Amino acid sequence: MTELREFEVFMKNYQDMVYGTAMRLLGNQTDAQDIAQTVFLKAYEAFGNLATSKTPGGWLKTVTTNLCINHLNRYRNRWRFFSDMRSGDDDSEFVDSLAAPEQLDCALDDEQRRKLLHEALCKLPDSQRVPLVLFHFEDMPYDAIAEKLGISLSKVKTDIFRGRHSLKRFLKYRLDEADEASSA
Amino acid sequence: MEPEMDPKLEALLHRELKQLPPLKAPSSLAPGVMAILAARSRVPWWQRSWWDWPVAAKTAFVVVALIVAGAFGGGSLILGDGVSEYSLDVAGRLDFSESILGNFTPLLSAFHRLWEELAQPFLIYGAIAAGAVYLMFIGVGTACFRFALKRI
């Protein structure tokens, strides 16, 4: 089997993981696909080592995360001058874009609720979504997130706190269930 | 001040997020990457970046580069006085070019005078005007962008 063929098999094994990581960090399909493509082009350059590595998934995840953060920083720097950059404190646009409360109250199955939760996660402002994803999906501690994003520990905690509260409405039914179970 | 975390919400959200189904990569991702790699592999090695050259070619390049640099740097030491004589000979043969250039000197000084008297002040004022217009357009553009963003 030629190296290109081997790499194609390798890529097909990891493409969902790489794309999924990028998609959750960026919240945008086009950007996620671009980043995933760049990750695999870098992976091909290092394929000699990756093919024999025991943890190629870890390498791919680290590169994906770093490229996504770089991408967001570049975008932020480019537009900051022109648009005052929508600050993390301004959640009005995000809250407006979420599903209406009556839509959440009606009987939805688990799959539909998860779909809404995923969509809400993608719509979170970058400043909230990225630390939230790093904490809950990548299992990174707060201090490591602060170091990776180059922001203070208290800012990370505040952003995650705000992100969780934005998503809380999607878990209301679960919280109610948990309350009922504990009071019974 | 740091916010007070709600451990119940944190645990529940963690569980719910972990239960989200894995996302599937678009079907165009792998063919796109393979097409780029195939296109790259068709480029001959000497047209790629130096880092992608074969090890033998890279080594040969470094050796040749060192030899050339050494020849330039240490050539005169090895060849001794012969080099000085040869360079004097070459300089003598090129003397005619000096006289040709000498004929252009008045013309060049005339152009220099013209530049100092006429073109230079205009260029300076022109550059200042262009800079002012550029800054004005950035200001107007920023104001329009912010206004449009508020309207959206």
Image (spheres, coloured by chain):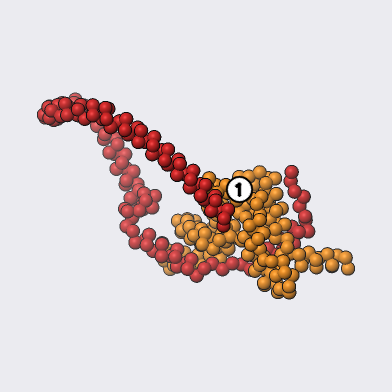
Chain colours: A orange, B red
| Residue located farthest toward the right when viewing the structure as drawn | A184
Q: For this rendering, which residue is in front, B119 or B1?
A: B119
- In the image, what residue type sits under mark 1? Leu
At x 53%, y 65%, the residue is: A15
Q: For this rendering, which residue is in front, A141 or B114?
A: B114
Residue B86 horizontal/vertical position (percent): 15, 29
At x 62%, y 52%, the residue is: A127
Quadrant of the image containing the N terminus of chain A: bottom left
Report if residue A113 is visible in the image: yes
Report if residue B95 is visible in the image: no
- Few, some or many C-alpha atoms within 10 Å of disc 1 (few <14, some 14-19, many ≥20)? some
Please state if B45 lies on the left or on the right of B18 as rendered: left
Residue B120 horizontal/vertical position (percent): 30, 30
Quadrant in the rendering for residue A152: top right
At x 38%, y 39%, the residue is: B130
Q: For this rendering, which residue is in front, B147 or A13?
A: B147
Q: For this rendering, which residue is in front, A107 or A6?
A: A107
Q: Compared to B136, does B150 lie above or below?
A: below
At x 47%, y 64%, the residue is: A7
Circle 1 residue: A149
Please state if A133 lies on the left or on the right of B109 as rendered: right
Residue B68 horizontal/vertical position (percent): 27, 38
Q: Compared to A70, does A36 lie above or below?
A: below
Q: Secondary structure at mark 1?
A: helix
